[in-house]
Image (cartoon, grey):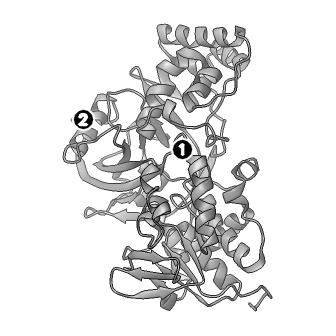
Amino acid sequence: MTATGEARPGRVVIIGGGPTGLGAAHRLEELGYDDWVLLEAAPTFGGLASSIVDDQGFTWDLGGHVLFSHYEYFDRLTDDLLGDAWLEHVREAWVRMRSRWVPYPFQNNMWRLPEDDLVACLRGLVDLNSDHPQRPPETFDDWIMQSFGAGIADVFMRPYNFKVWAYEPKEMNVAWMGDRVATVDLGRVLENLVRRRDDVAWGPNATFRFPAAGGTGAIWDALARRLPDDRLLADHAVATVDPDRRLVRCTNGESFPYDHLLSTMPLDTLLQRLEGHDELTSRHDEFRWSSSHIVGVGIDGDTPDDLATKCWMYFPEDTSPFYRATVFSNYSPANVARPGRQWSLMCEIAESARKPVDHQAVVEATRDGLERTGLLSRDHVIASEWHTFLPHGYPTPFLGRDALLADVEPALRAMGIYTRGRFGAWKYEVSNQDHSLMQGVECIDHLLAGTPELTFFDPIAVNGR
């Protein structure tokens, strides 16, 4: 038994040292359970929530992360990890299109659009409200059309979502959205139009916090430091998983037996590395995802006035390769090498087989896009340009995803393998940092006490908090 009286499930091996793996390890330690080991392929911990300091001293996240939470446990832990080393922010998000700024969410602030676009969007809403009820949407594109009408779909939703996901909305399901996409209140839209009023308060991340120093990775660095070094093993990339022998083999030649395996590696990769179960391995190529290019640009001088309070901006047009840019220096002064004398922009570009990206030209294309969209001018002095490529950036909620998971996940679980986390679960709707950590915590609670894994099995309940 553990110190708190739970049953002992035997040896627990964790693959991956991102938020899910670290959360699971922390929970094991918290419960006094010491028969575990964590294997991380990289030399450091944090996974996709890591932060990087470039050669010029600028700090970058691996994407536009902000911290908000659906869990008291997560809040208590992060409070404890960083103490008072947090900065609180009120979200200021914008859409940049038609050479103007439109506050986010777009659909509540269409009064800022050029007249022709505004008329098209309003006509689509009026037509939508006069139509008869429609059958439940089968694709994300169906949902867009039924929720917003043809005008908003063509002006914003379709072009923007293709840039984000690198897949067309018609290739995506409707199960992932939850509270992630604002719907339309026609009366509210019309009132905003008449009053020419910005309406910006929607969403679960209307306020968020960010580490005062070290980027998002500071959270996970702090958590990793609390865990025992002899059970937290970096530079241990997994080569194969043998579920019949219950054995993990690493590329460095070491092997680790397990009774239960918590894998946070991408599920398609796990299936490829599975030994002796061809019926599961053969399904790895059914998964869909997008890769991410993160391009950071550090600039000398003061932040321009029109960016001085903005958090992040969305870009639906083809005037830029990036779909989102974050004024990363606004999150924390410590994100630049010389606080008060520099500022920074962090841009995200999605890639898939449907939307290829020229890796050699992406930094130059990003710089050109920043100039075309008015965020940079040729007078700005560039102090740093940084680029990284994430082969697995976002788990696509593709058509057929839920049926595939319903086949694969129970089969793995029957073999003592729990696949959880952003790409382990392959559920974008529960892939934020809070969700990811809690998937690890809840998996351990299930193994030790038999409690249900709410986040993995009931995302709607979790996101409805």
CA neighbours of label 1 inside 10 A, class few (<14), some (14 to 19), many (20+): many
- Of 87 and 109, nearer the camera is 109
SS state under label 1 = loop
Residue plotted at (28% across, 49% down): 300
**Residue 104 seen in render:** no
Mark 1 highlights which residue?
Answer: 397
Say the numbered circle drawn on residue 368: 2
The residue positioned farthest toward the right in the image shown:
5
Residue 171 in the figure: left or right of residue 410:
left
SS state under label 2 = helix
Residues at marks 2 and 1, CA–CA distance in whole angstroms:
31 Å
Q: Quadrant of residue 226?
A: bottom right
Say the numbered circle drawn on residue 283: none
Q: Earlier in the sequence, mark 2 or mark 1?
A: 2
Asked if the residue at tag 1 contacts the one at tag 2, i.e. Cβ–Cβ closer than 8 Å, the answer is no
Quadrant where the N terminus lies? Answer: bottom right
Residue plotted at (33% across, 51% down): 342
- Of 172 and 360, nearer the camera is 172
Three-letter code for the amino acid on which mark 2 is drawn: Asp
